Image (tube, rainbow, N blue to C red):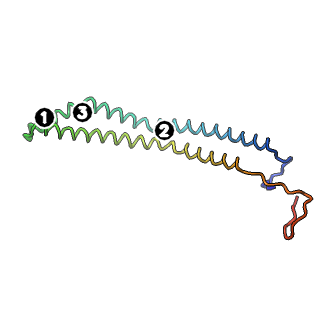
């Protein structure tokens, strides 16, 4: 049995091995939860700006932009001698472009902030893979000490 240089006082049994594995899994779960809490705090701090930008953009759009757009439409009608419908159509396009700019800035900041959760997802995937591989491992069969050696095979040093 390969012990990686460690000397074992007694042979491992299923209960001891499972108990050790269960302890490791519980400890891993605690660490994963701690990392998740840290990432949620980090994400909240990073996305706070984007949420604020989104609220400001919505307030500006809902509050003052209609008045500005009406004024812009009237400016086009008076200055360029356009019809009212043409002036209001161009003013509406300007308003849509301005709100799209605010929302694009908010989306950019929000997506950057949400990427910090990737670390928790990666760590969880590695932990699940480790648990699966630990559960899948089969113990190697122990060689009998009185068993005859096959030709060409070195003797067991124990």
Identified at 43% across, 35% down, the residue is: 48
* Label drawn at residue 54: none
Image coords of residue 94 (percent x, y): 22, 40
Mark closer to the chain start, 3 or 1: 3
**Residue labelled with disc 3:** 65
The crowd level at tag 3 (other Cα within 10 Å; few <14, some 14-19, many 20+) is some
Residue designated by label 1: 74
Tell me the CA gap for discs 3 and 2: 31 Å
Q: Compare marks 1 and 2 and give the one earlier in the sequence.
A: 2
Q: Which residue, given by chain and number where applicable, does mark 2 sit on?
A: 43
Q: Residue furthest left?
A: 81
Residue 14 at x, y percent in the picture: 79, 44
Q: Residue at x 32, y 33 (%)?
A: 58
In the shown orientation, is residue 93 left or right of residue 107? left
Q: Is residue 45 above or below residue 153?
A: above
Q: Quadrant of the N terminus?
A: bottom right
Looking at the rendering, in which quadrant would you find the C terminus?
bottom right
Picture coordinates of residue 15, whole percent (x, y): 79, 41
Q: Quadrant of residue 157?
A: bottom right
- Residue 87: horizontal and vertical position, in percent? 14, 38
């Amino acid at each position: 049995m390969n012990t990686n240089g460690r000397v074992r006082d007694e042979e491992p049994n299923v209960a001891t091995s499972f108990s050790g594995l269960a302890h490791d899994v519980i400890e891993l779960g605690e660490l994963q939860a701690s990392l998740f809490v840290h990432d949620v705090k980090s994400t909240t701090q990073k996305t706070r700006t984007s949420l604020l930008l989104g609220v400001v953009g919505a307030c500006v759009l809902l509050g003052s932009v209609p008045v500005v757009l009406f004024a812009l439409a009237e400016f086009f009608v008076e200055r360029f001698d356009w019809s009212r419908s043409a002036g209001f159509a161009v003013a509406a396009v300007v308003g849509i472009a301005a709100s799209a700019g605010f929302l694009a800035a908010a989306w950019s900041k929000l997506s950057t902030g949400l990427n910090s959760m990737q670390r928790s997802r990666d760590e969880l995937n590695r932990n699940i893979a480790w648990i699966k591989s630990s559960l899948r491992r089969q113990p190697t069969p122990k060689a009998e000490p009185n068993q005859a050696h096959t030709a060409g095979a070195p003797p067991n040093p124990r």
